[in-house]
Amino acid sequence: MPDIIQLLPDNIANQIAAGEVIQRPASAVKELLENAVDAGANEIKLIVNDAGKALIQVIDNGKGMSETDARMSFERHATSKIKNIEDLFHIKTMGFRGEALASIAAVAQVELKSKKEDESIGTYIEIDNSVVKKQEPVAMERGTSIAMKNLFFNVPARRNFLKSNPSELKHIMDEFIRVSMSFPDVFFSLTSNGQEVFHLERVTLKQRIVQILGNSYQSKLVTVEEQTDYMNIYGFVGKPETAKKTRGDQYFFVNNRFIKSAYLNHAVMGAFDSMIAKDSFPMYTLFIDLDPAQLDINVHPTKQEIKFEDEKIVYAFVQSAVKHALAQFSISPTLDFELDPSIQQLDAVSKPFTDEKKSSVASSSLYNTFSQKNQAHFIENRSELKHWREFYEPAQKQSSQFPSSTIIEELPNVLFPEKNIEVSDENSLQQIHSTYILVQNDTGFLVIHQQNAHERILYERFIKAVEGKPISIQQSLFPQTIELASADVAVLAELLPDLHFLGYHLEPFGNNTFVMQGTPADVEQGNEKAAIEKMLEQYKHFSSDLKYSKREKLIRSLAWQQSIKAGKTLTQKEMKSIVQELFICSTPNITATGKPTYTTFKKLELDRMFGR
């Protein structure tokens, strides 16, 4: 029998390594941006075409590379940052493993230009499928330009798994935002298909947050800053009224590296406990600095998941710092009468922090532990950490008496004896708690939840609209301009065709703005901008659910956004309209997300309750 084990050719080995490092265009963007930061650049430009599938180019004014270094940078395991095993435990740079450029060269056609300050001429290298095709001198300024073209051109199966251009561009923007957020003292720009999407001048951290997340945060950020001998934390959290239905505006950085940590997120959520609704997420951009020896950042190919040597101390420190910041700045949000009533009733909204509350937080043993020098390792009251375990314990699944919407949709006429309810002029309806509608029928009465019912009505109306019966558009006499955060522009652009079916006539106007030329007739005039912003927020809330199509998510988002909310007092005419329209729906008893629209009380059961 001949020997069967053999070494893989370099180009195949590199492609296998690339499968871990370069999963999509955004993966390459992350690696190239981090290399530019490590090169000491204070000006970094990212250029993409066709959502990175055709071109990803990063241009920086960093220290550049010599001819030898430029050639060596594409070899596997070639790095300037690790010289011995001890260096692995003191990493302060962004990239360090020597895999990025070799991986990129294995799955794309790469052109590199680089020049050092003290050299008169730079180096140009052209690589195709890990093979150097050309190397020659080039005239250029100090710095480096790397252009990768036709990603996955030699791995068509990988290319076929890429998502739509708007989806891939969204991932690129996410990576761009994470790196640019971490280095506000560096100029960053992002240009897509010739149009500049981001232009971020060198600013303070607070200004960078506003540059990226939008002007709505300008006066709604609370400073977080605590220092100890063990670790430091600084950054900003949003005031409670900025909490949203999605966790998109949440950023954790450890030693300036963006990380994903459900554990630390739980700590921040705990600090906001009772201040925001349970289904809402606060905004935060928080930086943790600690000795690199206290953590392991090399536990995942993307380096976005890390391990702390003592995660309980970090958890307690983060939660204590955020609590102290919120108390110190006397958070008392102004009332917003469009807020959900459940939010309006929270103590954080209705009652400002008193001096007693502030002193209570500041005098807690946990806070004192972190505010006294050389005490970070000695947490006196570990009982304050008791809730951290709850995050890891699997939640008990609660059985619901209402089947999922997908099951109910298949049973249109079996479960609904109330389907033929009619409301006569003589039969007045009763609203209780500005939320429920009482409807009498022959066998008893129904209690209808007005928002859930209206969501079902709108959902079925929108389904018909996108299936061939477009909602008529009311042209605006004075078209309104809508300015969005750059990250939301790509989302809205992808939704424009379906929005047109649903009665919204929006046109791009450049520089992150759209013009609202027309809206559905039932959208209140002057409220168009808020309607679109709330729809986008709800759409992102649904975006993590992969089983639904883009169109389905949009319809559900609009149905929620336009529905009559709980807490609104209705007229007899409005109540009758909801009841009549609900019971001509194909599935009147639940919303699209499976919430009940009504429940039934039988007269016989009532008689039995009263001994009759």
Image: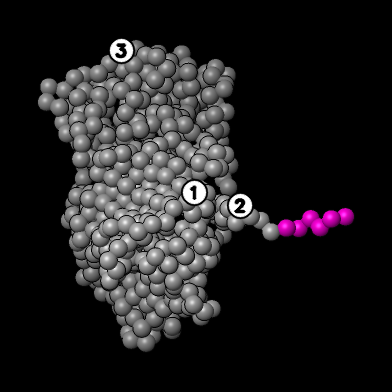
Residue 193 location in percent, x, y?
A: 31, 39
Indicate which disc residue 128 carries.
1
Mark 1 secondary-structure assignment:
strand
Going from N to C along the chain, the mark reached first, 1 or 3, is 1
- What type is the residue that disc 2 sits on? Ile
Q: Is residue 85 visible?
A: yes
Q: Residue at x 34, y 25 (%)?
A: 497
Mark 2 secondary-structure assignment:
helix
- Other residues around mark 1 within 10 Å, as few (<14) / some (14–19) / many (≥20): some
Mark 3 secondary-structure assignment:
loop
- Residue beneath label 3, please? 425
Image quarter of the N terminus: bottom right
- What type is the residue that disc 1 sits on? Asp
- Residue beneath label 2, please? 12
Spatial CA span between label 3 and label 2 = 77 Å
Q: Residue at x 57, y 19 (%)?
A: 414
